[in-house]
Image (cartoon, rainbow, N blue to C red):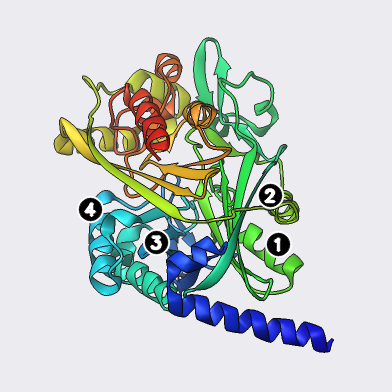
Amino acid sequence: MRNALIFGVWLALLSTAAWAWGGQDATSNGYIYAGIGSVDITPSLPVAIVGGASAKQATTVDTRLYVKALVLSAGGKKLAIVTLDILKYPVEYVDQARAKIEQTTGIPAGNVIITASHTHSGPMWISYPDVVVTPIAEAVARAARDLAPCSVGIAKGLVEGVSQNRRVMIGGRAWNRWVLPPSADHQYPAEGPIDPEVEVPALVGNDGRYKAIVYNFACHAANTMRTPVVSADYPGHVQQYVEKHLEYKVATLFLTGACGNINPDYSVRQELFGEKLGGEIMRGLGRLEFIAQPAFWVESREVAMPGREHPEFSEKEIALEWPQALEMFKGSFYEMKKSEKPSYPYFFTGIRIGNDFAMVTNPDELFCEFGLGIKKQSPFKYTMVVEQTNGAYGYVPTAQAFNDGGYETWFGEHSQLTTRAGDIIEKESVGILNDL
């Protein structure tokens, strides 16, 4: 016991010395500086929640909503990863938030990624004071004040039986499962694959406790869609599961995988979804592969992404597949026609930590096939494709999906980019990973 106590004091003194010497020395000793900050953004009740054809009033809270920030520092550089429990976050507000973060913390705007969880059980960003800019900047400021040396470990696993490709083929056309009777949900072939892989980077403090757990999984956060409650959806249940089994509070940051065509299997109860994904995360923590020298690099790019070619209103198809939402889609079409542009400012960010791990981000709801393609071509052992990041431009279907039709292909606020967007994103993402 006495020897253990002496060792603990020695380790604490060593950590303090490493902090005084700076991030580069800590990195060379197998540490990176990490800080966590969070701000509760759970709205007052009752509140209108979004994510469906019409808003619904919620009068209860299932799991609370947060802005969470992870700041990493090494070699005189800093970066911030911010997660929002919100449906999406448009690029104009990302610009405001990144500028405020740079002003208040000194972290360069290009080293900040802001990613929405895409929860379907919360209010729109516009419902918040200051469109969430201040809570985002405050969470990052708190994380920047919380820096402490941590080791970084990575694991990956598989979570099967909880997600499904939400597009099924009927008579040569794509239909979304939610417009079918529950009894018909599993009767038809899926148009495409799913991605069951979950990547789990984790930061461990010198006391052996987890400072932060990050995970990337390709599935819409839409598990509470059919019950109007405020909720972070399954990421909220994963957080509860992980904390219950660790027996202490820990920041669990969900980074949305490429899941434009992937939904939860609604026949799986939400708690089981959280248990299966949370359970695989816990198993991953038991087999972490630690990075010997966790220095990091950031690659940020802005491109002009072309808009949709010759958009037309798909009235006959919508009237057949989703007649109750016809007027909503008509309104979305004409509103988008009034505001459409030849191209849109579009941000990619790549982050590499050590030699074997990297992530690359995009501001879309990218079809799963593109995410799988990016990971297959990645030069890294562990690769995360993170969508809904630094903007929100809606669905990016495959060429096959545009041919098959369906909700994600109908032009409007939710689908506005060129039909070539997926190929452009895949090429740029792989290019960034290779450059890293």
Q: Given the image, on which type of amino acid does mark 1 rest?
A: Tyr
Q: Is residue 384 above or below residue 12?
A: above
Distance from label 4 to label 3 (Cα)? 18 Å
C-alpha distance separating marks 4 and 2:
33 Å
Residue kind at label 2, given as amino acid type: Leu
Q: Is residue 357 visible?
A: yes
Residue, x 47% and y 74% (percent of image)? 147
Label 2: which residue? 277
User: At numbered mark 2, what does the secondary structure look like: helix, strand or loop?
Assistant: helix
The residue pinned by badge 1 equals 241
Callout 2: few (<14), some (14-19), or many (20+) C-alpha neighbours within 10 Å? Answer: many
Query: Residue 198, position in %: x, y?
Result: 63, 43
Residue where numbered disc 4 is placed: 92
Looking at the image, tell me whether mark 1 or mark 4 is earlier in sequence order.
4
Marks 2 and 1 in Cβ contact (< 8 Å): yes
**Of pointers 2 and 1, the one earlier in the residue sequence:** 1
- The mark nearer the N terminus, 4 or 2, is 4
Q: Is residue 209 above or below residue 309?
A: below
Amino acid type assigned to the residue bearing label 3 in the image:
Ala
Quadrant of the rendered image containing residue 339? top left
N-terminal-most mark, 4 or 3: 3
Can residue 69 be seen here? The reply is no
Question: What's the residue at 60%, 30% (across, down)?
Answer: 194
Instruction: Give the foreground label among 3 and 2.
Output: 3
Residue at 47%, 24% in the rendered image: 321
The kind of secondary structure element at disc 4 is helix
Query: Is residue 129 shown above or below 285?
Result: below
Give the position of the C terminus as an image quadrant: top left
- Identify the secondary structure beneath mark 3: strand
Pointer 3 residue: 80
Viewer-proximal residue among 382 and 305: 382
